[in-house]
Every structure is written in structure tokens, then in C-alpha cells.
Amino acid sequence: MQIDLRTVSIKPVRQTFDHIARRFGDKPASRYQEGTYDLQQTDIFHYRPLWEPEHRLFDQQRTQVVMKDWYALKDPRQYYYGSYTIARARQQDAAEANFDMVEERGLADTIPATFRQIALALLVPLRHVEWGGNMNNSFISAYGYGTAITQPCLYHAMDHLGIAQYLTRLGLVLEGPAALDTAKDAWMGDPRWQEMRRLVEDVLVTQDWFELFVAQNLVLEGLSYPLFFDHLDNEFSTNGATAISMMTRFMAEWYAESSKWVDAQIKVAAAESAENRGLISSWVQHYRERVGKALAPLAEVAFGERATAVLGDVTADFNSRCAKLGLAI
Amino acid sequence: MDMQATKKKVGLKEKYAHMTRGLGWETTYQPMNKVFPYAEFEGIKIHDWDKWEDPFRLTMDAYWKYQAEKERKLYAVLDAFAQNNGHLGVTDARYINALKLFLTGISPLEYVAHRGFAAAGRNFPGVGPRVACLMQSLDEVRHAQTQIHALSNYNKHYNGFHDFKHMIERVWYLSVPKSFFDDAFSAGPFEWMIAIGFSFEYVLTNLLFVPFMSGAAYNGDMGTVTVGFSAQSDEARHMTLGLECIKFMLEQDPDNLPIVQKWIDKWAWRGTRVLTLVGMMMDYMLPKRVMSWKEAWEIYFEQNGGALFNDLARYGIKVPECLSQTAIDKEHISHQAWATFYQYGGASDFHTWMPTDEEMDWLSAKYPNTFDKYYRARFTHWRDEAEKGKRFYNGTLPMLCQVCQIPMLFTEPSDPTQICYRESEYQGEKYHTCSDGCKHIFDDEPEKYIQAWLPVHQIYQGNCFNEGVDPTAPGFDPLAEVLKWYHVEHGRDNLDFEGSEDQKNFAAWRGLATKNV
């Protein structure tokens, strides 16, 4: 059954803004479209930046990747601010319930000592890597080109901050503030973390923002998230350390969602031209080697003698992902 | 068990510190000045970033939760507004022109603020200010989008909104707000914080955002006013960040004082000039006025700003040097600006009109020293001429100020009947400014301001016509060609409100909604 309310109907003069209509025709547009396409100014700027006079304020020359239309890089999740915050709020509700449960029931005390140590040694220092992820994505959001990619990069930056904060809470739940100090010392001085820190710092000074995107969002995340939040997570949940899985569920879900967005960017950029494809592929090769080297000592902490095999699996999955994206690696 | 002892409750402030500044580290594989390359070139000295006091303590999970709640409510109202033809509830269709000014002149700036704060959120070596700047960057993209989404429904029914992105980069008067943000973003991160974080968000927000949103409330625009209410708590956070930033800079090193004072003087004046557009909106474009521009200036700048500067006096900060001129200008600028837009109503993307007798009486009462003496006769004359079918449109192009880019429409502080011009020379060329304030800014950084893309100069240089247009062809109409390049639809977007398509449609639709025909 259906009831029909009658309203006064007025014929609109136009359906959407001209810059949207030029792309999609004059028909009702989505909030993602009106809140994204062509928002960044492109043509006329008054002053050269004092901090980089060789470029314009927004400039396509800040990366070697060339796109005819940077708005080809759309977000399959169609996130604008409202839909982004509403999606994350739902996820944080679940995360909060998990942390509450772990804390109220004292579940941290049920974690076997070995796995507690592994979590403290790996997941807590990882918050510094996440902070690097925040910095790299805010860089892209500031200096990248076209709202279609700069907007989700800010969301991605804030997600990394959120994840760094969940990892901080995990440390606090497991061992209090001392866990954070120990992890910071390991990050700064433990030989097992130094390849990772060197990599993160090298990426921080990378100036080509699309290279940064590849290094951080495709390669570093593409190898480390499956390692820590899938393979290692399996170890936790099959060995009585479910409490840790509960506290990192956000990360696992987040990676499944955000990697689809990363894939869409890489796929479209690589398909644009042979030059782009070559460039992105060579970046992937370069960073895959470096990330592999950085993860090897950490995988050993996690998986002992199985480390090489697990890392091999992760890399093989990553390679087939890249192949699907059209990269030659 | 000793486990229990280490797990003592962590205080809120301490916990927040772990969640933010605890994440950072001193890099060693790459030098810090390479990781943060823009931290020093402006001459601001920071010795200890740990002295930064977080202006608000919001972790990401809390941010997502609060903001999502606000978004759900806001979009429910916007949907209802669209479904029920809320636009027909506004006082009078003239009001909608204030929204055009807002969408074309302000929303694109919210977007630039988002990018600029993302840059600041990457560039400061301190984690505390970076996190606060990133949250503001996120809020600013929110503001750009919620404004666009709210006004999208107006765009469907009224002219002038339809190509705001194209227009902000081209239309003559929109270079005023655009160049303001280009100026701030092209400066370094510290100047950005004084320009936008402090001057714009703290000192001037009550004179910009608030008048538009209050105007919406007074004129029955429930969609737009809900956007305003929804942004209030964001704006409060931005204000505390701006204030913390300036205090931090002043506390870190006494050498920062002269630099900060220079920026305050510059951006207070630059901001005041941009606000001319708001003044004219408040006094002329709102059918139901909130208060006069002069009253708003006195309450929000002279009184509230005065209290703020008293508070900053302990650091050696003085009130901006433009204050004596603004005390004179507040009686004039809204009338001078509206007179200009009325004359150039053929070249803008919104409608203009002359006030009714009743409205002129209101202006006389609010501006007893100036309105009748300097402006009423001119406005009455123009209105009489229009009634005789001789609506006045100025066919020439005005000279623009090299700094604020407003046409030379302001008068001498000592003589409201004389247009004010100032002249500077740089590398053998003459440059003109509208005031001592703008001349001062020009003379301090001439190498920056000579780059300005001045719309009138560009028209005369032939840079504002579509490709293939031949200015030497017989019967060439420069204004018509410029409008095409602007994407301003002649006869629909521009000219007088009287007789406009907006006026006719609004009347017809309101009739449809309120009468049985």
C-alpha cells in the first residue's frame, strides 16, 4: 500500500551547477559530485607562493604523473565530509564498544604473555608509522591537484591519526603509559625498527606527491596492514589473544575499505598513459623492496621462523593486487 | 600484582598528550629542517614546541562522533527545506542576492582555507598545532560543502549561482576575496595563522559569517541558518586555535613581536577592506535588516576587538594602526560600495536596486552623520531616473587598488567628497592604491603585489575574452564579450532586480504556493 502526499510542484530552472552539468549533463547531481568536482581553483592565481616561487598555488607540476583530467581519480566510496564522518562514527561506535568490553571485563589480563609481548613490541611502536601516514596524506591534501584526490587524502590523514590513537589506547590498556615510552625507545633505537624508521623519514621528505601516495598508501599500507592486521591478527585470535583482535578490528575493516579507494586511484592513473604506468610501477618496485626490508625483522618478532613464509605470502598477494591494477612489477 | 600498579588511571590532559604529541619524534635519518622546510623562513623563532597549549582536546573518535551527529541533523533539515520549497518562505526575493554573494565570494574561500590548513597541519614542527590545524582543515571542507549543498537548492530556482567556481577566478569584484586568500596561502605558515587563524577567524568572523547567517535567520531562510548554527561549534574551536597561536608566537621569543604586529596591522586592514562587501550586504541587500554595518562594526570590532587587544597588550601588541581610519570609514563604506555595484550592475552576477523610501529612512536613522548629507540625493536621483526608464549603468571601467583590488570608490578620510588615491613607484612603474593602509602593505612587499591579476587591467589587455573573439571586429562590444567569458548570462544574472527573472519566478511560485489559482 502506498499513500501519496501532494506538494506544490515547481519546475526548477536548472538541475545543478554549470561545472557539474558540463561533466555529467544538467540532471540532479549527488552531494559527492557537487561537493567535489572542480572545487579547487585552477586558472588564475594572484601571487607566486613565497615558499615555492617556481610553482603556482595549485599546480599540476608538483608530480611527474600526468593526467588530462585529475577528476578522473574519483572516490568509489563517494565520501564528502558528511558521508565520511557518518561512516567513521559508525565504526568508532563499534571500536568503542570493543574497548569498553576489554576494559570492563579485564580481558587484557587473559592475554597469554607471549602475545601480550608481541603486541607491545609491534603494535604500539606502529603508532609512529601511522603518524607518518598522517603527515604524508596531509601533504598530499595540501599540495596535490584536484579535489577528487586531495579531499579523500585528508580523510585518510585523519584516519591515520585515529588509528595512531587506537594503537595508543591499546598500549595504555595493556601496560599503561610505560608501554608508550618503551615503544618510543624501540622506535628510536631498537635495530629491528630502524629500517622502518629510515623508510618513514625518507618518505616524509619526498616532494612528488603522487610518489608519496604510492609509497605510503599503496606499498607501505599494502604490505604492512595485511601483515599486522590480518596474518598477525589470526595468530592473536587463534591463541587466546582475542582481546587484541577486538582492539584492532577498526584497522582491519578500515584497510578493507580504504584499499579499494587506493586501488581506484592507481588503476586510473596507470591506465592514463604508458608513462604513468612505467613511473608508478617503478615506484612500486622501489618501495616494495624497502618496505620488505623494513618489515622483515618485525615479521620475525611476530612469526619467528615462519616469518619469511608469511612475508612471502603477503608480498605475493600484493603483487597480484598490483597486477590487477595494471602495473608491471 | 605489580601489573595493577602500572595501570593507574591516566588523566585527561595527559592522555590527550599521549594521543597527539606523543606520536611525534625528532627525526635522525633526515634532518628536521628538511622534514619541516617552511618553519623558519619567515623569521619567527620557536624554541620549544612543547610549550604549546592545546586549545581544545579532541581525539579523532570523539571528532567523528560529534561531527557525524551534527551532519545527520543538518542534512535532514536541508532535505526538508528542498522538499517543501523552503526558498519561497524568504522575506523577499531580493534577499537571495545576498546568498549569491555568499556562494560566489565566500564558499570558495572555505575551500582554500581547507587546503591552507592542511598545509599548516603538515608544516609546523610541533605536533599539537599540527593536529589542531588538520581538524580545522577538515572543518573547512565541511563548511565549503555544507554551504554548496544548502545553496544548491537555490541554484535550481534562481540565477547567478550557477557557475561559482568559474566566476571566483574571473569576475571583477570576486578578485577581492580571492586575492585575500591567495595572499595568505602564498605566505608562510606563521603568517597564514595570523591572517586566517587569528585575524579572519578570531577578529573578523563576527563581521562576516555571523551577519550572513543572522541575515538568513531574519529573512526566513531556514536552510542557510541551519548551516550557520551547525558551524558554530566548529567556529568556536577555530577561534581558540587562532588565539592560542598568536599567544604562543609571542611567548616564544621577543623578536617575534614586531613581525606579528606587522602581520596584525596588514591583515586587519586587508580584512576590513574585504568586509566592505559584507557591510553593503547588511545595509542594502537584506530586506529585513539585522543591524547596520556601523553598529556591527562598533560592537564586534571596536568593543569586542578592543577587549581582545587589551588582553594582548601585555605582550606588547598594539591595536591595529588602521583603527583611526576605520572609525571614519564605518559611516561611509557600505553606501559607497552599493553605489558602485548599482552602477556596475550590468557586469555582476547578482541583481542590484535602489532602496525604497522606507529603507532610506532606516539608513538615515542609522547613519545620521552621513546618509542624508552625502548619499540620499544620489540614490533618489538614480531611483527617479530608473522610474523614468533611464536606469543608470556605468559603461566605463573603474581603476582598481593594487592591493585590495576594490575599485577606487573610497573617499579621503578628511573629505568624503574626494576619491582617495595613493601612488607608489616600484622598478620604474607606478602603482595605485586606495588608502594609506593598502599603500603601506604594497610598499612593504611590492614584489608580491605587483603580481596581482587585476580584472580591469586584464580586460584592457584583452585577456578576458573567449578564444577566437576579435576585439578589432566592427561592432565589437567589450562588455558583452567579457560577460560571456565570465559566464554571466546577460539579462538573467545581471541588471536591476526590478524586472528580473528571479523577481518574476519568485512571485509566480509564491502565488502558486499561497493562493488558489
Image (tube, coloured by chain):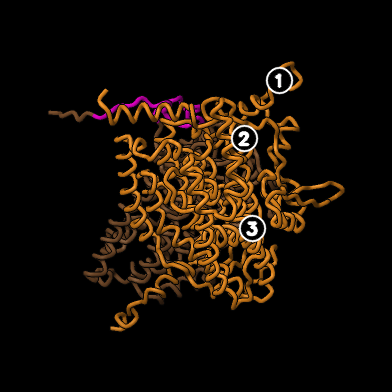
* Mark 1 residue type: Phe
Disc 2 is placed on an element classified as loop
Which dot, 1 or 2, sits closer to the camera? 2
Q: Quadrant of the C terminus of chain B?
A: top left
Q: Which chain does the residue under circle 3 lie in?
A: B
Residue A204 on image: x %, y %: 58, 57
Name the residue located 54 percent from the left edge and 62 percent from the top edge: B301
Magenta stretch: residue B408 in it? no
**Residue B149 or residue B42, whichever sits in front:** B149
**Residue A145 or residue A233, whichever sits in front:** A145
For this orientation, the residue located farthest to the right is B428
Chain drawn in orange: B
Question: What residue sits right under mark 2 in the picture?
Answer: B344
Decide if residue A294 is in sight here: no
Mark 1 or mark 2: whose residue is earlier in sequence:
2
Mark 3 or mark 1: whose residue is earlier in sequence:
3
Alpha carbon separation for disc pair 3 and 1? 40 Å
Residue A301 badge: none
Tell me: residue B157, above or below residue A250. above
Q: Is B7 situated left or right of A140 in this image?
A: left
Alpha carbon separation for disc pair 1 and 2? 19 Å
* Mark 3 residue type: Trp
Decide if residue B413 is in sight here: yes
Q: Is A233 situated left or right of B407 in this image?
A: left
Q: Residues within 10 Å of mark 2 (few under 14, many from 20)?
A: many
Residue B269 badge: 3
- Residue segment shown in magenta: A7-28
**Residue B176 or residue A101, whichever sits in front:** B176
Question: What residue sits right under mark 1 in the picture?
Answer: B476
Q: Quadrant of the N terminus of chain B?
A: bottom left
Disc 1 is placed on an element classified as loop
